[in-house]
Image (spheres, coloured by chain):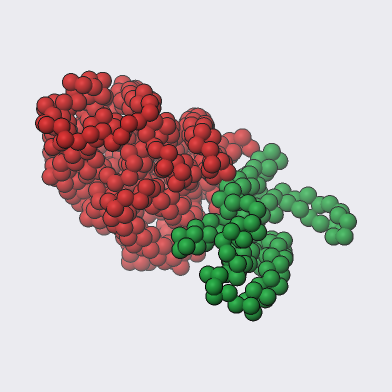
Chain colours: A green, B red
Amino acid sequence: MNNMMSLVLRTTGYFLLPLLLIFSVFLLLRGHDEPGGGFIAGLVASAAVCLHLFFTDIAATRRLLHIDPRDLLGWGLTLATLSGIPAVFMGDPFFTSQWVEMTLPLLGETKVGTPLLFDIGVYAVVVGSVLAIVLSLAEAEE
Amino acid sequence: MGHTTALLALPIIIPLLSGALSLIYWRSRKAQRIIGVLGTTALLVLSGMLVAEVWQHGIIVMHMGGWQAPFGIVLVSDMLAASMVFMTGISAVTTAFYALGSVSKRHEHFGFYPLMHLLLAGVNGAFLTGDMFNLYVWFEVMLVASFALLILGGERAQMEGAIKYVALNLVSSAILLSAIGLLYGLTGTLNMADLGYKIGQLEDDAMISVVAMLFLVAFGIKAAAFPLFFWLPASYHTPRVAVSALFAGLLTKVGVYALFRVFTVIFPFEDTFAQSLLIWIAGLTMVTGVLGAAAQFEFRRILSFHIVSQIGYMLMGLALYSPLAIAGGIYFIAHNIVAKSGLFLISGLVYRFKGSYELKELGGVYRQYPMLALMFLICAFSLAGLPPLSGFFAKFLVIRAGVEAHAWWLVATALAVGFMTLYSMVKIWAEVFWKEQEVCHIKPPRKYHGGTRIMYATVIGLALLTIAMGLAMEPLFLIAQMAAEQLLDPAGYIEAVLGVTP
């Protein structure tokens, strides 16, 4: 993979990688009432990492991730499942959204709730599973 | 309120959570095993509580996320669903314990435990959901998990079996999905209770029978009913024994359950073409299954063909459509899960000691391992329907219902198939346990480190359970009867979910 490295790809890649990651977080956060959400944000994030894989090598991509994709998968699934449970303690059926309103510096009035936890869980599951597949395919090729 | 409805979601949440946790601990075998045992045990306990709750208070309904039916997805547990979840719990616990002894390090590394939990979540979801499309989704969850479990290890025979398995199951999923689409176009709803209510008022009989036929075919394939059952004997003998036993106990039963559900609540069966067709399907499933088994000489293949033939009895219970018949069918499902898983697990122990599944190569197990032989006799006789084991009562109920309905051909077939089952079981007994083993050129797979005791314990547990289910016939029959009455009175189900009387 390395020998056919293109300078153009690498330069734009280093620009695009952070942009794509920020965009994925944006999609993740606006997702509850508007188009977006954990699934699509996860796909964007994994596309960003795949791009990185294209212009570097597997070892560098693994370093970039810091964490094994399989761990992401497990934690994400756990978080998504757990996000349904707080409802029970409030006397509602499972997976009823629970919201907390709070005032944060910079953001002002913000609503935070269990759907966000669910979306983050889904995000981690998508990133984890896509990257686990892509990385093991890339390793199998070498 | 909160506590009862939580009981309804936990049989799905617990396996999901256990699966997620075992994914987190994918590096540690030990943690995964502990989670496996704890998770399945919790599942069994909670499903027992669910049965008790339904027994006392009737049908329980939970509106997921607080969205009211028919717009949101509901979880509904009547007696049928609750008892099926309970049987899943039993199957799950035995598999988890048996896996402690039998599943190798390599398979655990490939994700046996997360997949097992995912499969359980899918199965329980299918049992508990009250929404047609959601049912389809749970079927897919189950299919994905079972496919991965089937090829775990990646041997050649497994791939071959898996291709047949996946191909046919995808066809059935496609049919199911089109049927659901048509149904939605017809009625504008996917909630099972709402569907039952609206279909009762529709005039378009032709379209309704078309959709009903599509469901019959789709679930028929998943239940391994005649004529599209051949994916089952082609694949069930290929994976690890713990996986085989889990499949044998649960997967086809979900298809049968879906037939029970759809053809009582949504398309009540009374005197329809589908009913007369199902009577034929039931009879032919029994016969082809048992004849297929007679021609086989591999331990697990014989057992797989017998699954098919036993499905016929369950369908017979549904097809006859009387309270006794349906109660019999439900009892039969419960009995079959226990007896069949037991037999598969025994075949695994025989393989561990002798290194083969081929009847010709095996022999002399009775002399070396009399306890194992005794367990086999109990499970096999139960399957063949000898009193006082659970299989006798299961067959007795279904056949008695047939006599009451004057379905003489079906009764004659069921009795004949019972004898053929006994023949198959005697064949295994004579070849594997009784005859002297010929010159031994096969060896046990490799040295195994302990775990045999735990495998024995699960087999003994299942054998005792099939005896207990025979001896405690009376209370179990009351439960099955309650389930049958709820099924035959869809109005009660619709009222419980929608809160209105149709």
What residue is at 43 percent from the left and 50 percent from the top? B145
Q: Position of residue B383 (x, y in %)?
A: 23, 33
Q: Position of residue A87 (x, y in %)?
A: 67, 44
Q: In this view, does B41 lie above or below B26?
A: above
Q: Nearer the viewer, residue B335 or B478?
A: B335
Residue extending furthest toward the bottom = A8
Locate residue B91 relative to residue A108 in the image: left or right. left
> Residue A42's x, y, as percent?
62, 61
The answer to whether residue B362 shows anywhere in this view is: yes
**For residue B420, side relative to residue B67 (left or right):** left
For residue B46, side relative to residue A27 (left or right): left
Q: Quadrant of the N terminus of chain B?
A: top right
What x and y, as percent, mark residue B393? 26, 29
Residue drawn at x 13%, y 37% is B360
Residue in the foreground of this view, choosing between B471 and B245:
B245
Number of labels in the image equals 0
Camera sees residue B126: no
Name the residue at 46% across, 68% down.
B185
Above or below, B46 against B114 in this view is above
Observer-nearest of B99 and A117: B99
Occupied quadrant, residue B102: top left
Residue drawn where x is 30% and y is 23% of the image: B467
User: Can you name the residue that lies furthest to the front here?
Assistant: A3
